[in-house]
Amino acid sequence: MDYLFRFDRPRPNQEAMIGDVYSALEQRRDIFVNAPTGIGKTDASLGAALTFALKNGLDVFFLTPKISQHKIAMEAVLGIKKRFGLDFSFADIVGKRNICINDKVNAIESDAFYSACESIVKSGKCAYFSNSKNFGINEARLSESIESGHNALLDYSYGKGVCAYEIATKYAKSCRVIIAGYSHLLNPYNRGTFLKKIGHSIENAIIIWDEAHNLINIASAYFSTSISELGIDAAERELKAINSSIDLDYLKFAIKKLAAKKLGAKMPEAFVEKEDMTEFMESEYEKLVDSLEKAGLEYIQAKNAKRSAILHVAKFLKGFLDADDSSAKIVVNRNGRIRLNVSCLYPDRALPILQEAYANVFMSATMEPVKMYADMFGLANSEVRSYASPFPKPNKIAFIDENFTTKFSQRSNEQYMMMARKIEEIRKNMPGNLAVFFPSFTVLDGVSRHVNVDKRYMQRRDMQSSAIEPLLKRFMEDDGATLMAVMGGSLSEGVDYKNNSIKGIVIVGIPLTVPDLELKARIAYLDKRFDGKGMDYAYIIPAVVKAVQAAGRAVRSEKDRAVLVFMDKRYSWRMYKAAISNSIEIAESKDYIKSIRFFWDLNDVVDEVVKGKSYKDAKE
């Protein structure tokens, strides 16, 4: 069968994936795809889905967890359009906050932005929104801008004085393909409004979930929230600044009393039931939440603030009182600072969309074991497929360094200094760029301060996409540079490091979740729900997935070559080594630095032979 594919021919395993996805769609079945880095999952999934959708009058949603991952999907769709001369439209849609050009609200952070945006729009004070109402979407430049990505649309909208988000969603009504973030459809608080705005229905859509190993964690975050004494203090200061009569003293008193009742000197955290807070919660809390939301917006407008603690308190009250049995409510005392957390253990409320879609394609390079994900998504009867890497095995070599660990009990400045020296040694014995991925910013900061290299690129805490993209571009265009970032972040997952721009990756430590009461609750909940598999599902596998994702950034094509080093002795333990060995073959070496030199010396010889020299001359 002839599939829509932008290149002359697919790779062998990529061709199999196209056929498997198309076959699943024909049977209206969901499919889980575990396909290693470099197989071309985006092109394969979109090629199959578009071929089927255009024949059967369906839409295609391509969803990603990060904005940086939109570009690859856009290139694939645009390539198909051009190659086959097809007449259909597609749109790249990101969250409103990422493309707002109204200076009155675009500097406002987090959820406060959306509240402020809604308020200014309802009051008729946003000229950009007003100008968008009657703005036509038939202009050729608009189509070109939208299909070039959200940054191009932002420039276009600024020049026209219109709201980029309104124009994108209006344009999307006539689109066959929509590239967007998970939250647009997965978040039940946003889904209905978004679908109504773009005029599409889930029932007539194929949804491709890119990097689907993230789905459960992302969905759980929609139902998780927290509050602290310091946060309430900040909200009270804001209320005083606008002369509000709302009193939050009772809430702070409630949390203090709760901590005194539940916690002891040797017990820094404890579970909380709704009944523990009943006597302190306002009986008409919905009115209180409404009043707090209005006061928070008043504060932002009156003080030209970027955020509001009042709005955060309102969000917490909603989350605490709406929490169901799939959430753990925990009071914590850290160094005298009290916090009350609502942590979603499993996102039941977000997952119905998976049943509503015409069909789902879930794909990732680290969806192993595939059956686990099908189980957790509530789609156990789906198709599941795994594919081998399309690249020659000699192009990549991996080692485990058993001399180090980032296990919390063994962390020290001395350990960090030793890791830094080893990273410098690896750097000196390989060509090209090196990427070092850490389990957390705490470890990154601890090690990086001791690393002495010439060219350094650092991921910082709370880095926005506007800062990530130029940093990534500069690093990939450099040579002999070192990137330091965290596993599970924007630079370690879903990023296409083209042209072998990384020739070495060091995975420092295992990104295990902090073993706190929340993790204990999640393991227990998943144990009960999934036949005793809580430890695997909540703790071990998610950590290994992050490590393997980061390790997969180097080899992106059949010509790429790279060295991988897992710098933690725990990777040699059976349960971890078995997990990473599903996708990465570990080499044994008493002196892996010497092996790294040999690997690159041998590859230099191979390159010269390919160029036409004899093996003897090349070796010399």
Image (spheres, rainbow, N blue to C red):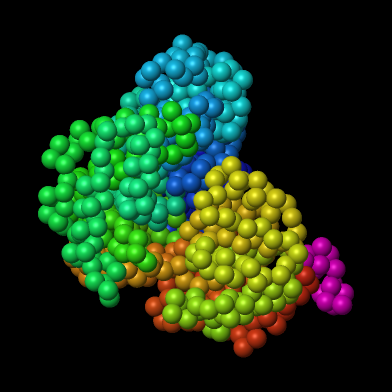
In the picture, measured across the screen, residue 55 lies left or right of residue 256, that is right
Work out which quarter of the rendered image holds the C terminus and state it: bottom right
User: x and y percent of residue 533 in the render?
Assistant: 26, 69
Above or below: residue 250 compared with residue 132: below
Residue 58 is situated, as x and y percent measured from the top left of the image, at 37, 31
- In-image side of 562 versus 462 (left or right): right
From the image, give the main secondary structure of the stretch colored magenta: helix
* Image location (x, y in percent) of residue 83: 60, 34
Residue 443 in magenta? no
371 and 124: which one is in front?
124
**Residue 180 in view, yes or no:** no
Which quarter of the picture shows residue 604?
bottom right
User: At 38% from the left edge and 38% from the top edge, which residue is drawn?
Assistant: 238
Q: Is residue 607 magenta?
A: yes
Seen at 48% across and 37% down, the residue is 306
Magenta residues? 606-620
On the question of residue 240 being in view, the answer is yes
Instruction: Please state the total of marks drawn on the protein image.
Output: 0
Q: Identify which residue is drawn at 49% across, 16% down.
A: 127
